[in-house]
Structure formats: C-alpha cells, structure tokens
Image: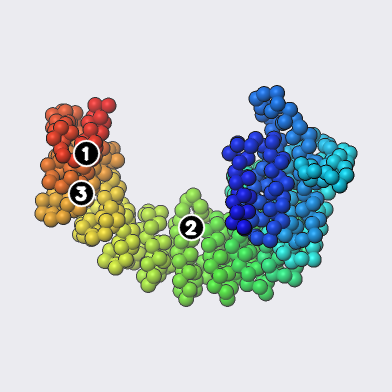
Amino acid sequence: DDEILLILAEQLGQMVFCGLIPGYRALSVLPILERLAGVEETVVRDMAVESINGIIPLLLVDNRSVPGKEEEEARMSCARSAPGFVLAMMKRMATADWFTAKVSACSVLPCVYQFFNGMKATSFTKQSGMGFEDNSNGGDTGAGAASVEGTKSELRQMYRALSEDDTPMVRRGAGKNLARYSEAVAKLPYGKKGSTSGPVAHEFVIPGGKDENLIKKTVSQDLKNKVYEEVVPIYQALCNDEQDSVRLMAVSSSGSIGCALGLDGNMCNDVVLPIIKAGAADLSWRVRSHLAKDFAVVARSQGFHESSRKVELNSVFESYSALLQDIETQVRGSAVENIAHMAQLGGADLFKTHIAPLLPRLSDDQAVEIRSKLANTIMDCCDESICTALTDKVILQDLKPCLECFLNDEFPEVQLHILTKLSRVTRLLNQMDVVVQSIVAMSKASNWRVREAVGFLLPHLAEARGVSYFQEQLLEVWMKLLLDQVADVRTSCVNGMPKLLSVTGSAWLQREIMGRYVSIYDDSISYLTRITVLRSFSRLSSEQKSLSKDLGQDVGIQLLRGLDDRVVNVRMVAAIGLGEMVGALDKGFVNGKVKPALEQIVTTDVDDDCRFFAQQSIDAITG
C-alpha cells in the first residue's frame, strides 16, 4: 500500500509539472497530497511535500495568457481562490492532531511564504474547509478578506508554534527547514531547482560578485529587523534544544541565517558567531559533524570577509581548526572537505595560521577516508575555479609534502585523487622532484587506474620538465603504457597524443615517436595493438595548430595501411581516422590516395560497419 501511495504522490505532482494539468487547475490535486503528507510512512510524506512545493508556485499565472474563454475563467477563479485555499491547507497541517502532518507543514510553510511574497495583490479572500470536498457539515467557505502582510505574520506565528512543539520530530522538522524559512522571510529567491531546491545559501558565491550584491539589495533593513526579531529567536532556541537531532539541523542553517540578515556583520556577530562556536564544541559528535559539513557555507555567509571583520573571521577559523582536530573520524572527514573553500575565504594568511599546521597530521591520519578526502580537497586548493588565494610559494611549502605523502599511500583511492588532478600544478612540477619520481615509479603499479592516471600525466611532465627530460626519463615509460594489457591505460596514452604534440612539436614527434609506433604496428600480433597505434595517429588531428604537413602526411600513410588490414575492426578505425585527419592532410594527397582508398572500401568491403564509416569519411572529404 505504501508503495502505491508513494507512486501516487509522485505522479500527482508530475501531472502538473509536465503540463498535463495546468497550474491554475491544480487546486483540486492539493487536498489529496495534503492527506498523503500526513501518513505515517516517511518516504510517502516526503514525496507528497515535494509535489505540493512544486505545485504551489504554479497556481498563479498572472504574467501568462491562457487560450480560450473557459481556461481564462479557470485561471481567474484560481487567482481568486488559491491564496485562501493554500492558507487554509497550511493551517490544517500546522494544527493537526498527529505529528506527521506537522512535520510536513514545516517543509511546506517556507514555500507557502514565498507564494505570498510573490503575490501582487495586497489582499485576498480567506477560505476555510477543504474547498473541493463536500461541505456537508455546514462550514463557511468564505471568511472575509485578509491582507498579504497579515497572512505572512500569521505564517510566522505558525512556524514559531511548530518550532516549540512538544514532539521532537516536529521540532526537528522545523530545524531542518529553518534555512529555507529564513530565506523566505528575507525574500531571497529560490535556488536553481525552484521551489523544490534546497537553501539558496548553498548556491551563492560569496564573497564578491553578483550574489553578494543580490543579497544586500534584496534584504532591506526592515527585512533584517523582521528576521532578527522573529526568526532568530527560533534559530537560537532550536540550536540549544535538548535533542541533538534538533540541534544538528538548526546549526546547519547558520549560513542561511547569515544571508537572511543581509550579510550584516554586526548582527551575525551577535547572533550566529556564538552558535558556530557552541556547535564546534557541542557534546554530540553528530552536531559537530553537521556543522563541519556545511562550514564553508556558514563561514562565508556572515559578512566577516570584509576588512573590518578580521577578528570575527579569525574566530570562525579557530572553530574550524577545532573541527579539523576533532576526535571523531566523521567530524574530521566533514571538516576536511571544506579546506579549499575556507582557504579561498580566509586567504593565505589565515590558511597558514589555522590550517597548514594541521595538514601533516591529517595526511598521516589512520582513517583512509580522511586521507582520501584531504587528497581531493588539497588538489581543489590548486584549482583556480575553486581557490585562487594560495600562491605558488604556499603550495610548494605547505601542500607539496602532502602530495609526496599521498602518492606513496598504500591505498590507490588516495593516490588517484592526486594523480587525476595533478595537471593543475603542471607549472610547479619542475620544483617537485619527489612527486615526479613517485609518478614514474607508479607506472608499474598493480592497480590499472593508477597506471591510467600516470599515462594521462606524462605529457604534462614533458611540459613541466622539458622535452629532453621526457625523452631521457619518460619515453620508455610512455611506450610501456601504450602496450598495457588494460584498454583504458592504452587509451590514456592515445588521448595524451595531442598534448604531447603541442609540447614537443611535430619535428620531435616525427623523429622520436613515429618510427617507434610504426615498428610496434609492423611487429604486432594482436589487432588491439594496431588499433591503439592508429587511434594515436588519428588523435593528432585535434591539435592541428602544431601538426606539420610532413607529419600529417606520414600519419595519413599509416592510416591508409590500416585499410588493408585483415581484421575488420582495424579497417574501421583507419577509416574513421582518415575522416578525422582530412583537415590536416594535403588536398592532393586526399584526392589522389585517401578518397580512392575509401571508395574501394565502400565498394568491396564485406563488413557493413566498415563500409558505413568509410562513407562517412568520404562525406567529410566532399562536404
């Protein structure tokens, strides 16, 4: 039965979302979803709530015209009755006898509040009863007019009552949705997924940029005061609740509270900073873990990034440092994942003061989970799209020892987090001798994913260390990986050919690589080896700026040889490669040799796929 109810809750929402039921005709769906939102089974309630939250913003279509007189009348009717109907539904859920409906009310109320935020009218007609059910008890369906601002005040009182409910599950629901509720009161917009998305504070890019300007422009002084007077007391009460399951949810909303206060440093210093400090020292590891998980979002949303707030920002980093040293593995793991974002927020000075001294201990942590997450976040510190605050000097001084440690870790998972992203520090590899030596040694690793990552990195080492170093130290490693028994390892060398060409140039590649590859092709026993060589040649087409005519001609000749292979797969790869190389080949060579050879394949080859790809390459030539 619960499975049927779950599907019903999902499909009722989907019928509206996909347009099968227009939003202005969806009021009749809400009573069913309201009942489903009060059942015992959690997954059914959650799905019903998600459908309700998705439908509510679609009820009013004031800015869109609808076709037909009947549809327009339905739209107008919905516009008149929807506010009162939604408010009546919200009241029933918030004052229900059983806790399940109240828990759902905590999730629905922020969306209802946003619904009234978006109303253009200043008043509407109240409504009681179920609206679309038989009113056989004689209840009044109309209860006069109500102002939008008065209704929002009523909704705030509802949420406060829910946060003070005797049942811990209801208070937990209030804490869980406190972030979305505070953002609704502050009139902040929905996230990318609209009314069903999580707190928008998690999507804001702060400090700087359009998001910070949006927050400061949207959250007026009146809204700040409203949040401070009516939301903050709820936040403080829930963060000090006797139940840790309530506290952990409320503490996680600290980032949204900061945004709802308009990134006002004074208010956040009075309200949020004490909660951050208390949360980092909470007796329950679950509370500390939830705070650590969202710590970067919380820290950047308090307005402490301004130059006048260095003391407060330093206090935040002290709390973060405590979480990085927590005795519980789960807490340290959650905190470690935020290192890159915290480094971006605090800059090199705070990073070196509060985070860098802890890295050696964390990199030797007994828990592989910690080392794996640290390896990943350290490479994020070198990603310019995430963190630009750390200079090359800081990376070499504080992060390089961690890289050396992780590349020699006993678990491939840790090694791979470094290897797959090490190209981000290509410019510094000429100053990382131990790192380079470790990479070369790992080309013989038993784990094929490690060897694959090494194959990807070798052209980047050529760029960092120079062509002569690659030729003397890495060329033989490259050739061995090219013949690896695992296809993905060979493919890493194939895909690295364009990078190698751009670094070494056509002349070097033609002199040092072509002869070796041709010898491998001639001496090959397995058709897979010949395919690898031909794919390596054809991949050079993506780096035509560095591809000389002579090298292109040699590549074309080798691909033509592939058309005569006895194995269909080899002929197919050769035909595809010739189509890719057309732009890099001399027109006379193409028309005199390539096109006739492909036409012969189309005419005489016994394999349908081979003829198909040959025809595609011909089309690329003639097109």
Question: Which residue is the site of mark 1?
Answer: 608
Q: Is residue 565 visible?
A: yes
Residue 523 falls in image quadrant: bottom left
Question: Which residue is the site of mark 3?
Answer: 531
N-term mark: 1 or 3:
3
Q: Position of residue 216 (x, y in %)?
A: 70, 44
Q: Nearer the viewer, residue 86 or 521?
A: 86
Q: Position of residue 406 (x, y in %)?
A: 40, 68
Closer to viewer: mark 1 or mark 3: 1
Q: Position of residue 412 (x, y in %)?
A: 37, 67
N-term mark: 1 or 2:
2
Question: Which residue is the site of mark 2?
Answer: 381
Closer to viewer: mark 2 or mark 3: 3
Image point (45%, 56%), residue name? 382
Residue 492 falls in image quadrant: bottom left
Inspect the image, locate mark 2, and give the three-letter code of the amino acid beneath it. Cys
Q: Position of residue 150 (x, y in %)?
A: 85, 44
Above or below: residue 561 compared with residue 355: above
Picture quarter with the N terminus: bottom right
Q: Element under label 1?
A: helix
Image point (69%, 49%), residue name? 33
Cα gap from disc 1 to disc 3, whole angstroms: 19 Å
Q: Element under label 3?
A: helix
Q: Nearer the viewer, residue 17 or 262?
A: 17
Residue 226 — which label?
Answer: none
Inspect the image, locate mark 3, and give the three-letter code of the amino acid beneath it. Ile
Would you call the spot at circle 1 few (<14 residues within 10 Å), some (14-19), or many (20 or more)? few
Q: Could you tell me how many numbered marks the image carries?
A: 3
